[in-house]
Image (cartoon, rainbow, N blue to C red):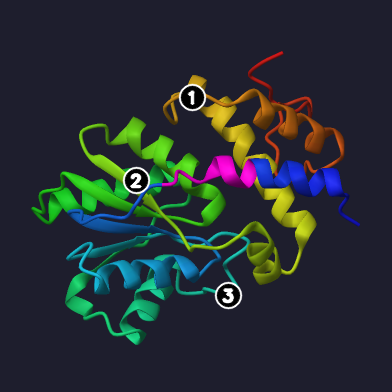
Amino acid sequence: MISTQDWADAQRLWDYHQMGHTPRACSVAIGLGSHDLGVADVAVDLYKRGMAPLLVFTGATSPTTRERMPRGEAVHYKERAIELGVPASAVMVEPRARNTGENIRFSQDLLTDAGIAVTSILLISKPYEERRSYATARKLWPDVEVVSASSPMTLREYVDSIGDARLVIDMLVGALQRLLVYPAQGFMISQQVPDDVLDAYDRLSTAGYTSRLLRDSEGNTLRPYT
């Protein structure tokens, strides 16, 4: 049973993870691979609204997607986009990336090799991964403008779509920890995290929502602050 306090804290993290950007026309839309085909659906919607002339889908497979997407996340995203009416000529696939940093770097390489000039990107992710994806792109591709996008869902709607509230909260906590830890490791830019979000993170961690947390070699949770 998820307590009222846990739901309130999860909502704080959910709200913080989303950038609140208004989609606008960009050079390209990049859909980051995951278990969620909703990323491809958002990319298709933006394409049909004239927000990007080209879609790039990036992602290999992971333990959580291997069975559902055996041909690779990016390939399944492309198939979904074509099924929804996007011409194959408007879709590029980057099939090797296994993390967010590789998503960004390999997509950048793909577009550069194709001679496609990029000044701005619509970066499409799962709702709770917007800020992490944004921070990663700003670090690794600093000369482009990044506009974040995801499925317009509430936390409760996302939980219903996954079917496991505890897992979703674990993912929210894990994503927040990475925003705190990764800047010092050079993986993303540093961002201001409000005190109420840090407090929510601490309460949820203490309450046991820890399955997605990074740990050191001794099994201790990585913490960038005291």
On screen, residue 52 versus residue 69, left or right, reads left
Q: Which residues are magenta?
A: 13-20
Nearer-N-terminus badge (1/2): 2
In the figure, residue 166 lies in which quadrant? bottom right
Type of secondary structure dominating the magenta stretch: helix
Residue drawn 67% across and 49% down?
171
Q: Give the camera-side residue of 11 and 73.
A: 11
Q: Badge 3: few (under 14), some or many (20 or more) residues near its Cα, within 10 Å?
A: few
* Residue 104, disc: 2
Q: Give the camera-side residue of 139 and 52.
A: 52
Nearer-N-terminus badge (2/3): 3
Residue drawn 56% across and 63% down?
153
| Distance between mark 1 and mark 2 Cα atoms | 16 Å
**What secondary structure is found at the residue carrying circle 1?**
helix
* Residue situated furthest right in the rendering: 1
Image spot of residue 12 (x, y percent):
66, 41
